[in-house]
Image (cartoon, rainbow, N blue to C red):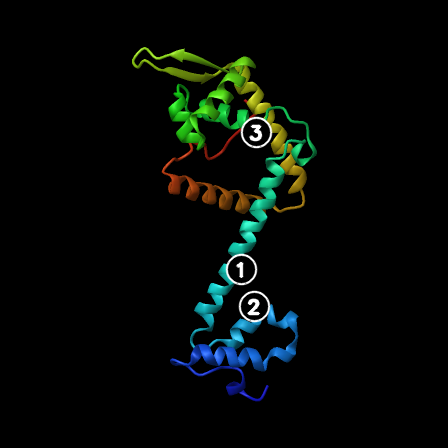
Amino acid sequence: MAGDEAVHVSEGPNALGGCIVQWLRFSSLGPSFHQSRGLWHFMLPRGTQGSLGDNVMREEDLASLVFEKMLLTRISCSGYRPYLREIVLDRSATVLISRLEKQPGMTVSELSNALGLDISTVHRQIASTIKQGFIYRKESSIRCVNMHYATELGIRVLHDELNSRKAAVENIVGDWSDEEVHQYMMLMRKFNRGVEALRSSPWPREENVDFSN
């Protein structure tokens, strides 16, 4: 390219048009270059490369995040031995018992709000876990409603399931550094808390969890 003027377009009202012209001028560089983030930097007017270029990168990263989250959900919600391990407790029962362990004595309505499920679905999950002996219901002495609690069996099976998942995750991140594992955990926790804040429904959690007890 012949000098700085051949790389940057002028600022002002015609900046966007200049960007398009630059795109056409660089069309001979091939599709691989067109798709690279570097091209956006060359096409942007002086003084805007940082902000607009960062916006483009952020949009690409958000799209990739959505895609990777879809793949993660596909695996974690599958009905056949996720992460190549035996299932101790199914996904819905795991979430239900986990919530009752952290917040015992919840009504169906409270569980519905906490889990983001309709009441009929929560009723079915409760009936199934009661039948398995994992939770029990008790009528409130204060309110005319049934309160739900995790049984000792339910908590023990829950911890067995979470330990099984922990071992499966260790197989996946075995070659990660301790710092990478910690950073990934913190970012996932931050993401989950963002979802909870959006729904105004915080999930009770401990900062450091030991499932062996």
Location of residue 17 in the rendering, given as x and y in whole percent from the top left corner: 46, 79
Q: Give the left or right position of residue 12, taking residue 83 as reference.
A: left
Report the Cα–Cα distance between label 2 and label 3. 40 Å
| Residue linked to disc 3 | 91
In this rendering, the answer to whether 72 lies above or below 14 is: above
- Toward the viewer: 200 or 190? 200
Secondary structure found at label 1: helix
Secondary structure found at label 2: helix
Quarter of the rendering occupied by the C terminus:
top right
In this rendering, the answer to whether 166 lies above or below 66 is: above
Dot 2 and dot 1 residues touching (CB under 8 Å): yes
Location of residue 36 in the rendering, given as x and y in whole percent from the top left corner: 60, 68
Q: Give the left or right position of residue 34, taking residue 123 as reference.
A: right
Can residue 179 be seen here? Answer: no
Label placed on residue 60:
1
Dot 1 and dot 3 residues touching (CB under 8 Å): no
Using a 10 Å C-alpha cutoff, classify the residue at mark 3 as few (fewer than 14 neighbours), some (14 to 19) or many (20 or more): some
Please tell me in which quadrant of the rendered image residue 90 appears.
Answer: top right
Can residue 30 be seen here? Answer: yes
Q: What's under tag 1, amino acid-wise?
A: Glu
Which residue is drawn at the image coordinates 67% and 36% (left, top)?
83
Which residue is drawn at the image coordinates 38% and 35% (left, top)?
201
| Residue linked to disc 2 | 37
